[in-house]
Amino acid sequence: MRIAIGAGVAVVVVVLALAQLLGPGIAARVVRGRVQKYGTVKSVTVKAWPAVKLLWREADEVTVRAGRLRVSPEQTAALLGEAKGTERVDASAESVEEGSLRLTDTRLEKRGSTLRARGVVSEADVKRALPEGVEVALLKSEAGTVEVRVSGGLFGVGASVDAVAQAEGGKLVARPTGLLGALKLMLFESPSVYVEGVQARALESRGGEGARYELSMWASLR
């Protein structure tokens, strides 16, 4: 009986040791495969202790380094939802095309259920993402909101209109200020991501690139 018990314990120890040795590598390949559908992936590392928690899609830390990615807002929300069981996520990409908008030097951080994402957008990329004839100029950013001046009829008005991008009920929306405040443009909405605030700040131009801005958004998974 003692020999049988000892053999059983030994088998369990070996299985756990193999899981700890091989589990993170297998999980990293799974993560790479999912992200690679949207572009180029340079490296993925996964850390978990004990590694058996990976069976329940839980991990201590995931790090992703990517090149160029192209995703829709819905695909972004789906990827974030899959990271719900990971305590710490650090992801970066050289560029991300989110719908029609291109961002560079993007970063995503997850700590527990808290998310923070940021990226750099150029004035030229903003123009390409907007409808023909529509222009947007940054006015100010404070208290988790971004105020811009829109011209060209984005809200159905030919004259210039000031608008504020802000979180409302976990969604990111844009509203004209003043009498047109009842109008609303949905910018981002997901059942798994609760948006809490946004920020924009002007950056120094580099080598004649024109105006550049850093955009940030913070949220929580639900």
Image (cartoon, rainbow, N blue to C red):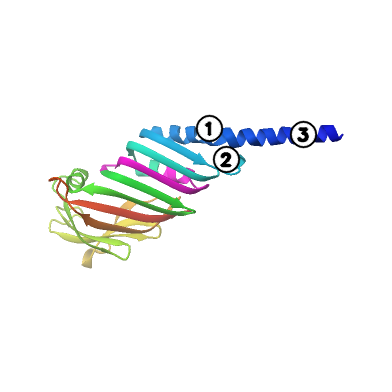
Crowding at mark 1 (Cα within 10 Å: few <14, some 14-19, many 20+): some
C-alpha gap between disc 1 and disc 2: 10 Å
Of tags 2 and 3, the one toward the viewer is 3
| Res 162 seen here | yes
Name the residue: 35% across, 44% down.
73
Query: Where residue 131 is drawn, which disc sits there?
Result: none
Is disc 3 placed on a helix, strand or loop?
Answer: helix
Above or below, 158 against 97 in this view is: below
Q: Amino acid at mark 2?
A: Leu
Q: Which residues are magenta?
A: 77-101
C-alpha gap between disc 3 and disc 1: 26 Å
| Res 183 seen here | no
**Quarter containing the N terminus:** top right
Q: Which residue is mark 2?
A: 54
Nearer to me, 194 or 132 = 194
Q: Are marks 1 and 2 in contact (CB under 8 Å)?
A: yes
The mark nearer the N terminus, 2 or 3, is 3
Q: Amino acid at mark 1?
A: Ile
Q: Which residue is mark 1?
A: 26
Report the number of numbered marks: 3
Q: Position of residue 81 (x, y in %)?
A: 47, 46
Q: Position of residue 4 (x, y in %)?
A: 82, 32
Q: Which residue is mark 3?
A: 8
**Where on the picture, by quarter, is residue 37?**
top left
Crowding at mark 3 (Cα within 10 Å: few <14, some 14-19, many 20+): few
Magenta stretch contains residue 87: yes
Name the residue: 36% across, 43% down.
92
